[in-house]
Image (spheres, grey):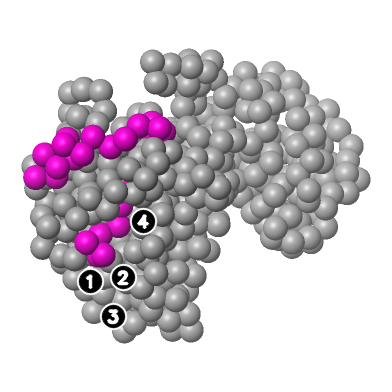
Amino acid sequence: MAWKVVPNGTITTPRGFLAGATYAGLKTYGEEKLDLGILFSEATCRAAGVFTTNKIVAAPVVLTRERLRDKRARAIVANGGCANACVGPQGMIDARNTSELTAKKLEIAPEEVLVASTGIIGVELPMGLIRAGLSRIALSTDGGHALARAIMTTDTRPKEVALSVEVGGKEITIGGIAKGAGMIHPNMATMLCFLATDGKVEPNFLDKALREAVDASFNMITVDGDTSTNDMVLILANGLAGNRPLKEDSPGAGAFRDSLKEVCTQLAREIVRDGEGATKLIEVVVEGALTLSDARAAARTVAGSTLLKTAVHGNDPNWGRVIAALGRSGAQIDDSKLVVHINEICVMDGGVPIPFYKDAAVAAMNRPEVSIGIRLNLGNARATAWGCDLTEKYVQINSQYTT
C-alpha cells in the first residue's frame, strides 16, 4: 500500500486549492445548510471529467464538457437544490452566467470555470440568489468541508477523503468530495464528485487514470437502479507538488493511478452506505470470471437486485436471489462450478446447496455490512460492486421529494 490517509482530509488538502460555500436559498432553509460553493486553484490545472450516460443532460454538463476540450481549468462552481435541467435555452444561459459571475469574483477567465448543479429537475436557477450568494463566499484552505456540505441533496452526511503518496521523491496529495444517496446506478448516477491533486500529471494520462478509477468505483455502485441528468466526476491537477510530469509510463504512474482509484472507491462506498433509507452496505465480490466485463456485470447485477436488497434488509439468507441475478447478468456462468458465500457462510458449492444453520446465517446478516462472495471458477477475472439494502424509508423519501 503506497498511499496513506490524510486525517480529516478533503478536496482542499492538496497544495494550492481553496474552497468556500454559503447558503444562497436554493434549498429549503435549515440550520447550517449550505447550497452554493466554489473550488479554486491558485495555479492553472490540467483537468478531466467523466459524465452521465443519460441521453438527457443538464446544462452544466453540456457547458463543462465544452470547457474541458482544452483539458484546462482553475475553478468549479457548484450548487445544490436545483439541477438546472430540462428548462430549455434558459438553462445554458444561466450556467454560462454563473461561470461568468464566478470568474469575475476569482479574477480569471470564464472558460476556466467548470459548472455543476444538483437538485430538482425542471426548475430554473434563481439567478438573483446565485449572484448574491457568490458574493458572500469566502475561500480558505479548509473550505473543502463546507463545499462538501453545499452539494448534498438527500445525503445525511458529507463524503470527503484525502490520500498522500510519494512519487519520484515528492509527496503528492489527492483529495476528493462527493454527493449522492438516491438515483445511484452504474454508468454514473445522481452524484457529483470533485477531485483535486497537487501532482503534475500529463493530460492524457490524467484522463485515462480518471476513467479507470471511475469504472472500478462509481460505475460499480447502485442504490436504486436510476441514472440522472447531472452526474459528473471532475479532477483538477495543479502540479504544485513539484514532481516531474506523470505520464502513463512514468515510474510513479502506478502509485498515482492506485491512489486515485482508492480515493474514488472510498467515496463510492460512502455514497452507497448513505443510500436513501439504507441501513446496510452490501459488497458483492465476483472471482473466477472469464473476463473483467463478465466479472463486473455479474457483481453489478447482484448488487442491484431489488429482491436481494430487500432480503438483506430482512436478514434473509435467500441465496436463490443471488443465483437468479447471476443468471440474468449476461456473464458466462456454469452453475455446476458456482460457489457462493454470505458473510463467509458457504451456501452453495459446485452448484450444490450446502446445508447451513439458518439462525446462524440470519445472525451473520444482521450487521452493518453484508458480503456476498461468488466464485465462478471459469477464469481469473475479479470485480467488486457495492449496494445497499432497500427499506421502507426509501419509498417515503422519494414519495415526498418535491412535496
Q: Position of residue 233 (x, y in %)?
A: 41, 54
Amino acid on which disc 1 is placed? Thr
Q: CA distance from mark 4 to mark 1?
A: 19 Å
Amino acid on which disc 2 is placed? Arg
165 is within the stretch colored magenta: no
Q: Which residue is mark 2?
A: 72
Residue range (magenta)? 110-135
Q: Which residue is mark 4?
A: 63
The C terminus - image quarter: top left
Query: Of callouts 4 and 2, which one flags the residue occurring earlier in the amino acid sequence?
Result: 4
Q: Position of residue 334 (x, y in %)?
A: 88, 49
127 is within the stretch colored magenta: yes
Query: Of callouts 3 and 4, which one flags the residue occurring earlier in the amino acid sequence?
Result: 4
* Tag 3 secondary structure: loop
Mark 2 and mark 1 residues within 8 Å of each other at the beta carbon: yes
Q: CA distance from mark 1 to mark 3?
A: 16 Å
Q: CA distance from mark 2 to mark 3?
A: 19 Å
Mark 4 or mark 2, whichever is nearer to me: 4
Whether residue 267 is visible here, answered yes or no, is no
* Tag 4 secondary structure: helix
Mark 3 or mark 4, whichever is nearer to me: 4
Amino acid on which disc 4 is placed? Leu
Mark 4 and mark 1 residues within 8 Å of each other at the beta carbon: no
Q: Which mark is residue 243?
A: 3
Q: Position of residue 172 (x, y in %)?
A: 30, 70
Q: Residue at x 19, y 55 (%)?
A: 100
